[in-house]
Every structure is written in structure tokens, then in C-alpha cells.
Image (cartoon, rainbow, N blue to C red):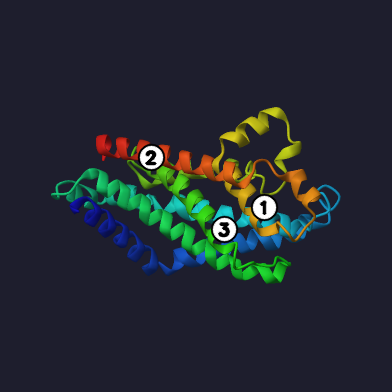
Amino acid sequence: MQFFGATFTICHRELIRYWRDKVRILTTLIQPLMFLAIFGSGLKQTLAQGNFGVDFIQFMYPGIIAMNVMGVAFFSTVTTVWDREFGFLREMMVAPISRSSIAFGKTLGATVIASSQALILLVLAPFIGVKLDIITLPLLFLFMFLVALAISGMGLFISSMMRTMESFGLLMQILIFPMFFLSGAFFPLTSVPTWMSVIAKLNPLSYGVDAMRQILLGGQIPDQILAKFTINTIPVNGLFLLVFGLVAVSAAVVVFNKRG
């Protein structure tokens, strides 16, 4: 009981810190809107012949949601570096609680923050021609949660090894953009070079984008068109994200226990 109590206490602290940082909330909402407005409008006509007959903004919309989940999840784990740099992490370490509960609490907090904020982006769906089915919303949120879990685990794993905010920020920038651009958000992964396809198969975000696109666009565009840029079935995507997330979180807990 002490383990779960400490875990949820740390998680609650992360949620409070996020809610109080209004600038952080605002910027993480503005970024996906900018991608939709600039890339969506700018590339819509250019790529009209290359996206299998689907409106480009609709095609990109699931990727924008996944990008928002990834960005919020990654940067929510920066609190680990912040707490270490300002000494608060050391105070938690000497408390009579398990180090693992601290790691799980931070991961859970980042996961809840990222997956919950992404729900706000669903209000854009009617404006870009995507019809939301209330029956599919739980499945959509499940994949938001799984993507957030996988990225939060990665973020905690990395932040546990970082000593300064600057080094964490630089490494995140190196990871975020390749992961996003190789996720299938902007172009189908069914017609890319082999080397790019291999990297995409290792990228957890590509599985999230693939699943969310099937969930959001399924039934709204012809199945034969959707199949042209579908990589895996929804269950396969879910299984990969679940396994990846559990492995990432476990690795993060191990490193956190050793270096926290």
C-alpha cells in the first residue's frame, strides 16, 4: 500500500505542476495547431496527387494528435532533471519510500498529462471534416495512453541519465523531430525506402499514428484507400505499444534506481 500511495502522490504532484504552468499548457496546444495550419494548408495542394485521394489535413490529423502526445510526454519527464538540479530529488530519495515508486509516479504523471491534453485536439475534428464516433473514443484514448506510456518511459529513461536541463533539451530535440517525421504523419510509410521503413518499425510513434488514423478515418473513407497507407492492424499496433511501453518503463525504473 505504501508503494501505491507514494506512486499516486508523486503522480499528483506532477499533475499540479503541469496545471500551474499555463504557458506550458498554451504552447503545447499552439504547436499542433501551427502544424495543421501551416503544413496542412501549405502542402495540401502540392501533395494532393500523392496521398491516395484523401484530404491531406485529414490524413495528417491523427499524426498531429500523436505528435502532441509525444511532445507533452517527453517534456513532462524533464521534471526529473529539474528536481535533480535543484536538490528536490535528493529529498525524495531519502524519504522512507521506494525509489521505484518515485519513477512510476513520474511516468504515470507524464502519461496522464500527455494523453489527457491530446483529447482537447479532438474538438478540431468537425472543422477538418473528420466525424467523431462516440463508440470509438475509448479506443482512441487507449492508444493516446499507450503512446504516452511508451514515450514517458523513454523520457524518464533519458532524464535519469541527464544532469542538466540543457543536455536533456538538446537530446530531446534530436529525438523528437526524426521520430515525428518518420511516424507516417506527413506521408504514408507504405512507399518509403527500405532503410526508412526499418527505422519506422522501431519507432513507437508510427504505431500510434497508424492505429489512430484507422480509428479516426475508418468508415469515413473507402477501405481500399485506407488500406494503401495502413501498416498494421489495430491489435498489432496496440500490442507493440504495450510491450514497448512496459520495456521502456522497466528500463527507466532500473536506471532511475541506480542513478537517481
Quarter of the picture holding the C terminus: top left
Q: Amino acid at mark 2?
A: Phe
Q: Nearer the viewer, residue 137 or 198?
A: 137
Residue at image mark 1: 214
Residue at image mark 2: 157
The percent position of residue 186, horizontal first and vertical second, equals: 70, 49
Alpha carbon separation for disc pair 3 and 1: 10 Å
Residue at screen point 60% across, 71% down = 123
The percent position of residue 243, horizontal first and vertical second, equals: 47, 39
CB atoms of marks 2 and 1 within 8 Å: no
Q: Tag 3 or tag 2, which sits nearer the N-term?
A: 3
Callout in the foreground (2, 3): 3
State left or right for residue 112 relative to residue 37. Answer: left
* As drawn, 140 above or below 235: below
Residue at screen point 31% across, 40% down = 253
Q: Could you say which quadrant of the image residue 246 lies in? A: top left
Q: Could you say which quadrant of the image residue 200 lies in? A: top right
Q: Tag 1 or tag 3, which sits nearer the N-term?
A: 3
Q: Nearer the viewer, residue 78 or 204?
A: 204
Q: Amino acid at mark 3?
A: Leu
Alpha carbon separation for disc pair 2 and 1: 30 Å
State left or right for residue 87 relative to residue 239. Answer: left
Labelled disc at residue 140: 3
The percent position of residue 3, horizontal first and vertical second, equals: 22, 50
